[in-house]
Image (spheres, rainbow, N blue to C red):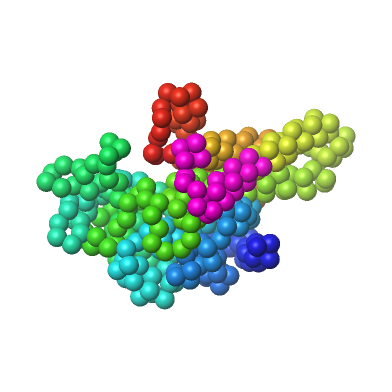
């Protein structure tokens, strides 16, 4: 296991020069350039999370966390794509019915890049053989370079939404070939500029039932027990790893900068300044504590599920709590670095400038918002027995 982990981490690290050389171009394009996409494929990373039947390696939770963190260290947008595209393809490969798997993966020799928004912002009228889907989605991270695009929708039968026993609609994910999608762009933003997180829509597009699966399913048709975690826990781990990687890059860069930078009016370098030393140690400790929480929680839950245990409400609660806390802590770390670095952090195109923009954009995501704290607190307090959306 250690050798395999080092292999994938080495593959990720081998992209550092390519990512740095292409960073400016990527932001100008507002999506990853072909050079980075091809490099991710060449290293096997674009599909490494897939079940073996889809050309993947079925990595452990620790392996996924390490790779995500490394890619986010290199560049926020590349890291974001790794937590968007890698899992999206893996989910489709694990959960699609056999006919859908054959259409999407087998027919394309498993070289499938897939992305989009899983949130149920569409409606699918049930008809013979599938659904007539209409919907409009935002922030489709990775859609700029993906051959297939996902869209969450609510199934409609006889004019009414199909409901689950939980009282929620039977939230479902459709997979569309790119040619069926109308892109309206909209991705003009402060940070994560290169993620190609475009807005898109479909109007009365037929999606065969075999190219759909339930959003909250944990019944994988391919791959091992790791996929029984389902979409939400793995997505949570990805967000946490992204924040950790981005914040680590900021800390590493400011430590290097501090050894040589002298701020106006100071008699010595930033590294010799006691207030900087104190704050660096504090935020280094904060980052390490957040990382330990994420790794301990995510790996313990994943190990239990892989061993055959059921995913419990407490496990899901603890995962979301860890991911949300780590993201908030990492935002504070990056804010410290931004202030400590002074004008070096505002030079357009520098890593410090980019990570500040990326972090404050990434932390706006609803998946790690204040709402998650409130929902986990209600479970801790016994006010709710469960929350299936966690």
Q: Which residues are magenta?
A: 292-317
> Depth check: 77 or 290 in front?
290
Q: For the point 57% across and 35% down, which residue is it?
A: 325
| 264 with respect to 322 (left or right) | right
Q: For the point 19% across and 56% down, which residue is it?
A: 132
Q: How far across and how far down the image is residue 303, in percent?
A: 57, 51
Query: Does 299 appear in magenta?
Result: yes
| 330 with respect to 182 (left or right) | right
Residue 334 in view of the camera: no
Q: For the point 46% across and 29% down, which residue is it?
A: 379
For the stretch drawn in magenta, what is the main secondary structure? helix
Relative vertical location of residue 264 with respect to residue 358 in this rendering, above or below: above
Relative vertical location of residue 203 with respect to residue 261 in this rendering, above or below: below
Residue 230 in view of the camera: yes
Look at the image and tell me in which quarter the C terminus lies: top left
Which of the 4 image quadrants contains residue 143? bottom left
Relative vertical location of residue 226 with respect to residue 364 in this rendering, above or below: below
> Depth check: 365 or 183 in front?
365
Q: How far across and how far down the image is residue 218, in percent?
A: 40, 51
Q: How far across and how far down the image is residue 386, in percent?
A: 41, 33
Q: For the point 24% across and 60% down, which residue is it?
A: 209
Q: How far across and how far down the image is residue 102, in percent?
A: 34, 71
Query: Does 81 appear in magenta?
Result: no
């Amino acid at each position: 296991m250690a050798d395999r982990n080092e292999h994938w981490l080495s593959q990720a690290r081998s992209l550092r020069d390519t990512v740095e050389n292409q960073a400016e171009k990527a932001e100008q394009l507002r999506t990853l350039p072909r050079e980075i996409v091809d490099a991710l494929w060449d290293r096997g990373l674009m599909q490494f999370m897939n079940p073996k039947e889809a050309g993947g390696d079925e990595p452990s939770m620790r392996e996924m966390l390490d790779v995500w963190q490394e890619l986010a260290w290199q560049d926020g947008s590349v890291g974001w794509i790794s937590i968007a595209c890698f899992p999206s393809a893996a989910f489709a490969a694990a959960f699609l019915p056999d006919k859908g798997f054959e259409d999407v993966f087998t027919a394309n020799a498993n070289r499938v890049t897939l992305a989009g928004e899983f949130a149920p912002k569409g409606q699918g009228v049930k008809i013979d053989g599938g659904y007539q889907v209409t919907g409009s989605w935002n922030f489709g991270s990775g859609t700029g370079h993906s051959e297939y695009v996902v869209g969450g929708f609510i199934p409609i039968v006889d004019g009414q939404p199909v409901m689950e026993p939980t009282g929620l609609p039977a939230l479902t994910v459709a997979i569309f070939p790119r040619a069926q999608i109308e892109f309206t762009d909209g991705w003009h933003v402060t940070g994560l500029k290169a993620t190609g997180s475009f807005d898109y829509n479909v109007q009365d597009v037929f999606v065969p039932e075999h190219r759909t699966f339930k959003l909250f399913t944990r019944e994988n048709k391919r791959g091992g027990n790791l996929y029984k975690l389902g979409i939400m826990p793995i997505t949570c781990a990805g967000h946490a790893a992204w924040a950790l990687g981005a914040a680590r890059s900021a800390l590493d860069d400011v430590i290097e900068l501090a050894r040589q930078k002298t701020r106006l009016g100071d008699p010595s370098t930033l590294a010799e300044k006691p207030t900087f030393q104190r704050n660096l140690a504090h935020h280094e400790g904060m980052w390490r504590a957040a990382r330990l929480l994420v790794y301990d929680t995510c790996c313990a839950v994943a190990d239990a599920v892989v061993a055959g245990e059921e995913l419990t409400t407490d496990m899901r609660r603890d995962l979301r709590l860890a991911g949300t806390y780590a993201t908030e802590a990492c935002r504070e770390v990056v804010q410290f670095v931004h202030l400590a670095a002074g004008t070096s952090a505002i030079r357009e195109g520098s890593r410090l400038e980019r990570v500040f923009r990326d972090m404050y954009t990434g932390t706006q995501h609803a998946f790690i918002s204040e709402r998650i704290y409130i929902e986990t607190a209600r479970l801790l307090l016994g006010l709710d027995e469960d929350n299936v959306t966690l």
